[in-house]
Image (cartoon, grey):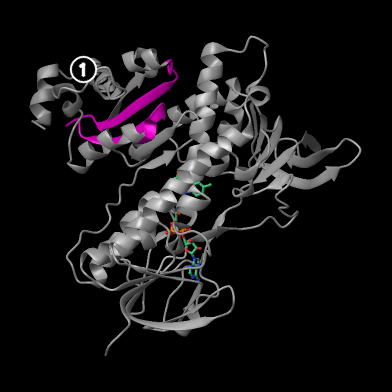
Amino acid sequence: MSFDYDVIILGSGPAGFSCAMQSSKFDKRVLIVEANEEHLGGTWINSGTVPSKALREAAKSIQKFHGQFGDERGRKPYERFKMDDLLQYKQNILESKNKKVKNDIIKNEIDTARGWGKILDDHTVEVSDHLNNVKIYSAKNILISTGSSFISPDMFSINDSNILDYRSVLNLTHIPRRMVIVGNGIISYEFATIFAALGTRVTLLAETDEILPFLDEEIKQEMNRLLKESTIQLHNSIHLQHVSNNKLRTCTEVGFKTDADPDRLQVVETEHVLYVGSRTPNTSKIGVENVDLSLTEDRGIKVDSYFRTSADSIYAAGDVVGSPAQASVSFVQGRIAALSMFNVESNKMNESIPYGIYSIPEISAIGMTEKDAVNQGIDVTVGRAYYNNLTQADINHEREGLLKLVFKTDDLKLVGVHIIGEQAADLIHLGQSVMAHNGSIRYFMEHVLNYPTYSEAYRIAAFNGMNRVYKAGIKYEKILERSGND
Ligand SMILES: Cc1cc2nc3c(=O)[nH]c(=O)nc-3n(C[C@H](O)[C@H](O)[C@H](O)COP(=O)(O)OP(=O)(O)OC[C@H]3O[C@@H](n4cnc5c(N)ncnc54)[C@H](O)[C@@H]3O)c2cc1C
């Protein structure tokens, strides 16, 4: 049977893009179908990962500059700096990333079709563009990488003026003095710290009894300590009562109750509300009913470890298959899908995935928390390095932070790394490599690490952990003997 393409990819986010790039390297004929009329790159480049990180970088620079040099007139950052400048910084980055993705696609002779893709059968996709022109394409394989969407609030509507979502918050015309953020997860916490860095008084309302519950307890304590010192007011276990305009006071009101004080209606007056709900996989109106696809309870597409669906010729990767719904993961999933559809031997995705929280300061982790290990009955010791002991942190005036290693007491094998502080999301990869090679904390004591760097934290934490093992009564020589060489 002959087909127009070897693979048709629905969606040009990180999952679709990496599948397309990998397939093109095997000289396969690839078509990407993208519903966005203007841009390729999906949430990754246009509305999620890259723009929010660009805004964060601009806010961080302002915070650092303002913190180090102050303002002779005592102004707050929002009085000194213009949102336009921040947005321009973000826009330049988006444009350059968009150009890069477009060029990569052209250079690798990948075809694109703009419009809404819908699967008609195991090998056929219909594409309708914004003028309702319809084209039909066929392919040996299909990859679904349509991403995910935020669930809208049911109590009020996003109007992109004073009530914003993660997209319209990137188009504010000024830096707000007050903002209420409603949300429990990573994205709401990231935005809270970004705006706090600009001097905005942020109220963060979380329906859960704590935010980021998966963090290691000590990292959480450090995060909560820093939160208390910031302009962010966190309320947990809230029940939203209303979000409405108060015309008399020309503000927006957010009313809520908490589990701790269920009879008291608390009202916060604010300029803007940012709502960050949970996300749901984009599986509607893409023709899943026309093929034999199984969906998860959350309407994600069920896949195996090679991103094969229950239909032989159809693969799925990225947010559309559900958690952990990160660009970092989507890139790897899209590539593995390409390898498996063209029968190229590949490893499954490593189950140990790092996460990066791009708050100010960053948080990152991989592997077990101390509590996980204890709950599993594993005898672990921890080693800590506080940033105020790092020369690089001194030089950069970034002294708040902690790197914590969790390792097995008997053979020093590293089982978890938890970091809050400057460059945490980058630093985590050194721990990840050691863990991927079944290494122990000896690596950090025996290898020369560049100095001064933030990586020095690994060395300090390793010695700190070693001392703790030693104090527990195990002789130093014995520990080294027992843990062997890395
Ligand atoms: C504010 C924010 C910040 C984030 N920060 C990070 C971060 O720091 N690090 C990280 O790793 N992840 C981050 N993420 C998550 C990350 O953006 C997503 O996990 C990632 O983009 C998912 O990739 P994807 O390829 O599955 O889908 P997407 O990037 O969402 O792309 C899907 C594409 O499919 C297109 N599409 C949908 N339906 C159709 C159809 N029927 N036909 C044709 N095209 C279609 C869409 O237009 C879109 O372009 C963030 C997300 C948000 C919202």
Q: Is residue 21 above or below residue 365?
A: below
Give the amino acid at mark 1.
Tyr
Q: Is residue 216 visible?
A: no
Classify the position of the N terminus by image quarter.
bottom left
Label 1 crowd bin: few (<14), some (14–19), many (20+), radius 10 Å: some
Q: Is residue 177 above or below residue 142?
A: above
* Residue 388 painted magenta: no
Q: Position of residue 250 (x, y in %)?
A: 85, 37
Say which of 382 and 65 sits in front.
65
Q: Residue furthest top?
A: 72
Residue placed under numbered mark 1 in the picture: 470
Q: Position of residue 30 (x, y in %)?
A: 32, 71
| Residue 166 shown left or right of residue 384 in the figure | right
Identify the residue shown where x is 34% and y is 55%: 331
* Residue 414 painted magenta: yes
Magenta highlight range: 397-425
Identify the residue shown where x is 48% and y is 33%: 57
| Residue 345 shown left or right of residue 388 in the figure | left
